Image: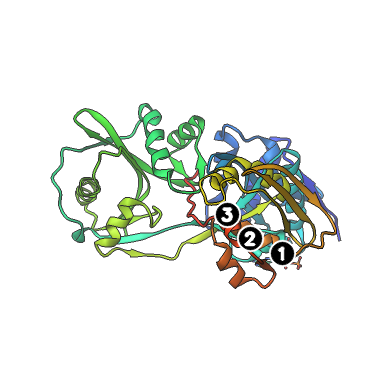
Amino acid sequence: MKEYTFAKPETDEDFEALYKVMDVAFGDEDVRSITRRFVEHHPDMNREHIFMVKQEDRAVAGLLLIPQVWRLGEVKLKVAEMGCVGTDPEHRRKGVQWILNDEFDKYAIEQGFDLCVLAGIPYFYRQFGYQYAVELDYSTEINLGKIPDNETEIRVEDFTEEHIEKADIFLRRAQEGYLVHSVRTEDIWEMQQKTGTYGGEPFKAVSLHLSGEFVGYYRYVVDKEKRTLYIKELGVDENVSVGDLTGVIKKHASKMGLTELKTGLPHQDEVNKYLISLGAKTNKPYTWQVKILDLTNFLTKLIPVLEHRIEDSEFKSVSKDLTMNFWKFAVSMKIEEGKIVSIEKVHGEKDRTIGLNPYAFIKLALGYKSRVELEEMYSDFWVRGELGGLIDVMFPKQPGYIHYCY
Ligand SMILES: CC(C)(COP(=O)(O)OP(=O)(O)OC[C@H]1O[C@@H](n2cnc3c(N)ncnc32)[C@H](O)[C@@H]1OP(=O)(O)O)[C@@H](O)C(=O)NCCC(=O)NCCS
């Protein structure tokens, strides 16, 4: 059989070949346009972020690395999202995605990324070390008739580039309370506005005004068939009441002849909680798949967050040598008077008081599951003796939510 080789695109023909792979891999879904948008408009992406497999001169598979920044508490993490993963049907089940995944990880390690993440198909990516770890794809649906009418002075206008600076403040307010969340740069705001796409899909946006002040925005799409206004993102000033906001949204939707409201906001969001209290139906969200590239580096990066958590707890001035046994290796962490003074990777560790399946640990580290939940789920995950309380303080369960950064 002819050999498969790894490549990054060099010429216009290579890029066209990549788009063709997306066409044949995804059929009716227009992944060509999504891929093109990354290539042509993403401020931080270039040919380095495009991974292809060729057989002789023919491109047969591809994927993209979409760089972004996520925050876990106050710590910024460099994140490599894998997107637009596709193989030409004639070349499937031959291991070409293994070639791409190996190269993806190699590049991500070289470039100092902390996490690889993706929002992809079920199960497939487990073989590459990914674990479900941050909530994704919420949906809440309600008939507009269930939302009270509310006469307010809030006016709805187009969202323009001028609104971006303040909208970013509203976005950051919406992100408070989510342990893991994204950081959207001004360039990305501008790219989304210019291309009219959010997370690879088209959107429209409105700005909200009260007494001449810009007080909020939302991004939406209209599903004409289902007569639904679908809100994908929403950010408002703290003085805008939920009742006024939903009243305005209802009016806006009704004017367009729509009868239903759907949101993609997290279920914990204030507006969503209100809609749920009015009888909205909610889904069980899907989940981001996450891989931590180097656990020791990752824990080292997390030191400020871990120290704050210790500081705010009953373990305030604890001194302890923790051995986190990840089975293939261990991480020994020295805590003196509440400060983490060293983190080291060690091999051949015999101490198994804290035994952590490293895959399950991803869920703990990102606040997706609690230590106790993971102990129940995995027989190779435990914290014995009296250390459970300290581990719970260092790694609490807390929801995450990612506002798209492309
Ligand atoms: C999913 C897809 C990318 C897999 O590509 P592929 O080139 O066939 O993958 P590989 O041959 O490298 O497969 C690697 C392994 O996964 C297995 N595998 C392939 N497709 C799978 C699937 N859909 N689910 C689970 N396992 C799968 C293979 O058998 C192989 O296992 P092995 O190493 O034990 O033999 C390809 O089917 C595709 O392009 N699908 C349509 C687009 C799509 O859904 N992309 C994913 C978007 S998130």
Q: Which residue shows up at 33% across the image and 34% down it?
A: 159
Label 2 sits on a secondary structure element that is loop
- Three-letter amino acid code at the position of disc 1: Thr
Foreground pick, 378 / 246: 378
* Residue 377: mark: none
- The mark that comes first in sequence, 2 or 3, is 2
- Three-letter amino acid code at the position of disc 2: Leu
- List the residue tagged with mark 3: 395
Label 1 sits on a secondary structure element that is loop
Foreground pick, 363 / 15: 363
Q: Quadrant of residue 89?
A: bottom right
Do tag 2 and tag 1 residues touch (Cβ < 8 Å)?
A: yes
Q: How many marks?
A: 3
- List the residue tagged with mark 1: 353
- List the residue tagged with mark 2: 387
Q: Is residue 220 shown to the viewer in this render?
A: yes
Position of 222 with respect to 335 (left or right) is left
Give the Cα separation between the discs numbered 2 and 3.
12 Å
Q: Quadrant of ligand 1?
A: bottom right
